[in-house]
Amino acid sequence: MAGATTAELVVAVSEAGGLGGLGAAALTPERLRRQIQAIRQQTEKPFNVNLFSPVVQDFDPAARPGPAALALIEQYSRELGITTTPVLESQYPDPGEQLAILIEERVPIISFHFGVEPEHVEAIHDAGLMVLCSATTVAEARHLDAIGVDAIIAQGSEAGGHRGTFIGDFRQALIGTLALVPQVVDAVSVPVVAAGGIMDARGIVACRALGAAGVQMGTAFLGCPESGIPRVWQEQLLRSSADSTGVTTAMSGRPARGLRNRYIEEMESLEEPLLPYPLQYALSASIRRAAIEQHNPAFPAMWAGQGVELLQIQSAKALMDQFIRESRDLAGQLARDR
Ligand SMILES: Cc1cc2nc3c(=O)[nH]c(=O)nc-3n(C[C@H](O)[C@H](O)[C@H](O)COP(=O)(O)O)c2cc1C
């Protein structure tokens, strides 16, 4: 979870028997290396680092916001007391450069969102490391299988954060976890990791029954102090329910599921095209930052999945221990009930 994971969260999850994942899309090469070293200093267990595919760098840098979007930004800036104008450039480092660091540092499991380049799969395998990538349709999963990824993360539409969709229209790829996982399992030759709406042992055991080899949980860890998300985001999560979230392109320019707020509602209502990712994200960067500092939930990006109402405020270790214990108990109980 880019922006919502820390070395401490990764270490706690890996030490407790899971595979901790560092969302590294926004980390500069220097920060990325420091985070990997910080993880290694605290655990000898395997961990995962996640990058965005290079497609995120594929946009027209000359694109500019329309007059209505600019007027909104100016109004929000006035309300929040911001005097600077937005800097419209990608705030993301080059994924190729980031990958070179992961390979050099021998990060055991590297994953991608928004697809993965076949040459990157090859480079990771040549280094003796493993590569995973998310898929939101069976067609994407088949493509990933064909280019040789080691496992596929089937991301259902319940999932918080950006949709990993990389083939076709994202609206056609909003497939629920319950429908997506077994179809992906049947279509590919590699293990499938289920993601989207899994918040507790019930979701974990259900996904194992669907044929998933494991689960990836995001939103469930946003209640952990180790996630490092701002207090305003965590407080809003605790006030939210499944119908508080929505998939929108208004925040970043790419479809993502998060808590709906005034920024999303008003940007979405404009009758002009929004900027492509990541310029749309850059447009609101200073507003999001100021809103977080001022504890104002109207403007930040607060990614969250539809399982949000099941969120618990617990340490990552306590949460992991609970998931493992309750999953074993539940699977045993289901076996006895047969
Ligand atoms: C705050 C947040 C940030 C996320 N950032 C990323 C990311 O950087 N890379 C990625 O592959 N997926 C990201 N995701 C999606 C997760 O990988 C996963 O698909 C999702 O969390 C699963 O659904 P759940 O949130 O209902 O558990 C993010 C999700 C959340 C909630």
Image (cartoon, rainbow, N blue to C red):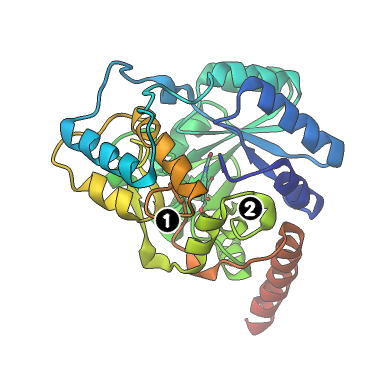
The residue lying toward the viewer, choosing from 137 and 91, is: 91
Determine the residue positioned at 69% across, 17% down: 126
- Relative to 45, does residue 333 appear above or below in the rendering? below
Assign the C terminus to one quadrant of the image. bottom right
Residue type at mark 1? Pro
- Residue 266 falls left or right of residue 283: left
Assign the N terminus to one quadrant of the image. top right
Q: Is mark 2 within 8 Å of ligand 1?
A: no
Q: Residue 58, image x and y in percent?
A: 38, 20
- Relative to 74, does residue 13 appear above or below in the rendering? below
Determine the residue located farthest toward the bottom in the rendered image: 337
Q: Which residue is mark 1?
A: 297
Circle 2 crowding by C-alpha within 10 Å: few under 14, some 14–19, many from 20: some
Q: Which residue is mark 2?
A: 214
Q: Residue 81, image x and y in percent?
A: 38, 42
Q: Helix, strand or loop at disc 2?
A: strand
Residue type at mark 2? Gly
Kindly indicate the quadrant of the structure image that contains residue 72: top left
User: Disc 2 and disc 1: Cα gap in Å?
Assistant: 34 Å
Determine the residue positioned at 64% across, 66% down: 313
Determine the residue positioned at 79% across, 55% down: 16
The residue lying toward the viewer, choosing from 98 and 192, is: 98
Q: Is residue 125 visible?
A: no
Q: Residue 297, image x and y in percent?
A: 42, 56
Circle 1 crowding by C-alpha within 10 Å: few under 14, some 14–19, many from 20: many
The residue lying toward the viewer, choosing from 298 and 137, is: 298
Q: Helix, strand or loop at disc 1?
A: loop
Counting labels gives: 2
Determine the residue positioned at 38% across, 29% down: 84
Q: Is residue 132 visible?
A: yes
- Residue 251 falls left or right of residue 217: left
